[in-house]
Image (cartoon, rainbow, N blue to C red):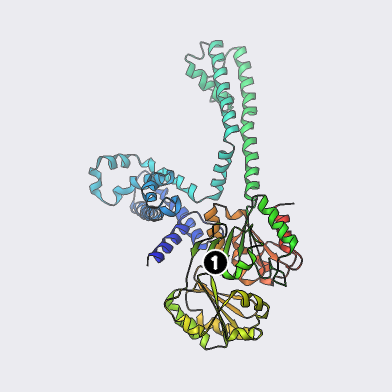
Amino acid sequence: MKIKMRNWRKRVFEIVEKSEDGDRESRLYDFFMLMCITFSLIPLMARNSDFFLRNVEVVTTMVFIVDYILRLATADFKLNKGGLSFLLYPFTPMAIVDLLSILPSLILFDGSFYGIGFLVAFRSLRVLRVIRVFKVLRYSKNISLILNIFRHQREPLMIVGALVFGYVIVVALVMFNVEPNTFRTFGDAVYWSVVSLTTIGYGDIFAQSGLGKFITVISAMMGVAVFALPAGIITAGYMEELNRERNYKLIAFDLDGTLLNSQKEISQPTLEALKKAADEGKEIAIATGRSLSGVMPYMDQLSMVHFGILSSATIIYDFWEEKVISMDNIAWDHMYDIADAVEKEDVMLLMMSEGVGLLDKEKAQHLETFHMEQYEKLYRENATMVENPVEMLKNANRKYEKINLYHTSQKARLRSRHRLEHLPLELVDSEETALEITPIGCSKGTGLRKICRYMDIPMKQTIAVGDADNDLSILETAGLGVAMKNANKRVKEAANVVVADNDHDGCKQAIEKYLLGD
């Protein structure tokens, strides 16, 4: 129960935070909040409040309150400081903005609040509700881009600011002494200096002597030059920020049909390209339907691989730390439905439990019947053979993160899909006749998002490479989707680019051309 509650809170956190590419629910939430922020400003455009405006204020304020509570309830995922996160969150900048957006409107819910002094102050300062505009910073990626530009270019902008400030003071001092009758105080001179520098003077204070007018002309001309400097810096910063977004930091490979060639091996040129990418600080992951035990035979060669999206993202694994980052299991109450579907067809059952593949011993003697003969060596060396796998499915003492059903034909697979599609499960076709079953919400795409959050890598800076239907989610989620030439038509249509096939070092091409930009 505690694990389910944590998973539920984590999903809420993913939704209320700024959406990642491919997270439909989070994008819808962002759009809804942006609309609420926009509508909440309408009452500030009227002097008096009528029934409609009052209700707009009430509804949007209630939405903001719920949003604040959800963010506070999931603060541990954002701040990563355990229980202390719930105490620290209210003092973070955006939480303060949220609170100040709510407090001035609380008087709408209870007239007795009018007697509370500090809320009366908020009522008189309706303008504080304008702070809601700053909530947009949380949802707009374009505004985030602009803020990043100012953050990365702060030093040159500060230098230009100091230059402008110094110029204003120096020119003000000169004019204050050149025309003492025109500029009675130094403040008047500073005011004139600013408006002449920006060429937007109102004519209320202006130079009268010939020398003063000459200085005014020089100041106005300097204004053009001085204000061109930050414009150039910001433009250059914008281009750098775009390049930074396109600077891919992570690449994720499917295994079978992608990183592995037809002989289930990784070519030497591909291994050399992987090593080069790792040497240049790039993160490398594998995203596969295989269990942990099915991947381990390759890890001596793939020591540069940091993360594994395993068993179709039901397990996220850190190979370097040798630890499970997250694990999802199929709900127990669906096991009898799956077992029932298996008993209605001639199916070879592969169950993945805590990273270990459990294979039907009897059916494994006839792999060719289920179109899986190419995996004979893998199963012989790494799978655990079991008797009565259907009975094991009904055993409440085991947890399964993924179940594969291998059929004798595609028509048989379609029948199994129809029997299970009413359940809250992810059903994905793979291989020639396989049906992969995972918990709802688990896909290679969601696995990639988990790794990116774990490493604080923007989705735009990721590449995914694959060839089959179970790769569609990750190709659509990544910043750049790469299809192998041997991929099916659906995968090629979903990808951004296509590289050579798995027997001609397509993964090497993806690394060198797109990850490293060689």
Whether residue 377 is visible to the viewer of this picture, yes or no, is yes
Whether residue 22 is visible to the viewer of this picture, yes or no, is no
Q: Between 145 and 366, which is closer to the camera in this rendering?
A: 366
Left or right? Give the position of 512 relative to 410: right
Q: What residue is shown at x 58% (from left), y 41% (from top)?
A: 149
Q: Between 404 and 237, which is closer to the camera in this rendering?
A: 404
Residue at the spot of label 1? 313
Q: Provide residue 136's location: percent of width, then percent of height.
A: 48, 48
Q: Between 356 and 13, which is closer to the camera in this rendering?
A: 356
Place residue 466 in its image quadrant: bottom right
Residue 50 vertical position relative to residue 302 in the rendered view, above or below: above
Specify the amino acid type for callout 1. Ala
Q: Provide residue 492's location: percent of width, then percent of height.
A: 69, 67
Secondary element under disc 1, as helix, strand or loop, is: loop
Q: Provide residue 226's location: percent of width, then percent of height.
A: 62, 28
Q: Quadrant of the N terminus?
A: bottom left
Q: Provide residue 107's location: percent of width, then percent of height.
A: 29, 47
Left or right? Give the position of 359 relative to 1: right
Pointer 1 local density, CA inside 10 Å: few below 14, some 14–19, many at least 20: many
Residue 165 vertical position relative to residue 428 in the rendered view, above or below: above
Q: How many marks?
A: 1
Q: Between 207 and 392, which is closer to the camera in this rendering?
A: 392
Q: What residue is shown at x 46% (from left), y 79% (from top)?
A: 335
Outermost residue to the right: 504
Residue 80 vertical position relative to residue 396 in the rendered view, above or below: above
Q: What residue is shown at x 34% (from left), y 53% (from top)?
A: 58
